[in-house]
Amino acid sequence: MQTCPNESSTSHIQATQVLSVKETADLELTERFFAGDESALRDIYERWSSLVYTIALRSTRNPEDAADITQSVFISAWKGRAGFDPNTGALPAWLLGICRRKIADFYSAKARVEIVATQAIESDASQPIHQVDTVSADTIVDRVVLADELGRLGDPQQKIMELAFFNDLTHIQIASVLDLPLGTVKSHIRRSLDRLKKRLEATGVTP
């Protein structure tokens, strides 16, 4: 059965009209977002968050990390919306550009934390873990990544490592604060650092 020329023409016109409506809706959404309409942020998130999440997940291979990156992308997009120029590209492309930068930041932070862990394994009980770090782990991204990794540890390892990384306490000071034998503290720290280093290596931070 052949399609009537009129039917084919009508289908083409309808498809063009649908595309036009979609493009118009995208343009209006972009204008609302650029103008600071908070409801536009919600609409943009509903429209393109799955795309951003898919890209992040493909890179990190971890749903939790991908979700964190996705959230960070839209927060950064909202805060930096004044820097978006619709004349240079569509909004989805801009969001994916932010996503790529967030992924790069994520891996850079994990690499820096991996350096801290490696150096800390070689440190002694009189030196705070933070001070052996030749690459600062004090940036916000680094601290978030580190806190997330330490959160995977159970107690007392998590508490010991938080005191070591975030309070710059030596092994001896940690033993005193937690009323634990120094040997126990050193053992927990070494095992936790080994575990942290292996996890970071497993996620592709190191070759």
Image (spheres, helix red, strand yellow):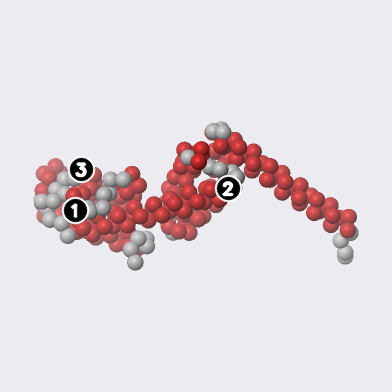
Please state the horizontal and vertical placement of residue 200, each as a whole percent of the image: 32, 59
CA gap, disc 3 and disc 2: 46 Å
31, above or below 119, in the image: above
Q: Residue at x 64, y 38 (%)?
A: 28
Quadrant position of residue 199: bottom left
Query: Given this view, does label 1 or label 2 mark the residue nearer the observer?
Result: 2
Residue at image point 86% right, 61% down: 3
Amino acid residing under circle 1? Val
| Residue 179 visible within the image | no
Please give the label number shown on residue 132: 1
- Residue at 16%, 49% (x, y): give it: 128
Residue under pointer 2? 88
Quarter of the figure with residue 196: bottom left
Q: Judge depth for marks 3 and 2 and give the one in front.
A: 2
Mark 3, Cα crowd under 10 Å, few <14 / some 14-19 / many 20+, is few
**Residue identified by numbered label 3:** 167
Name the side, left or right, on which 40 lies relative to 205: right
Would residue 131 be seen by someone viewing this image from the given angle? yes
Q: Within 10 angstroms of label 1, few (less than 14), some, or many (20 or more) residues?
A: some
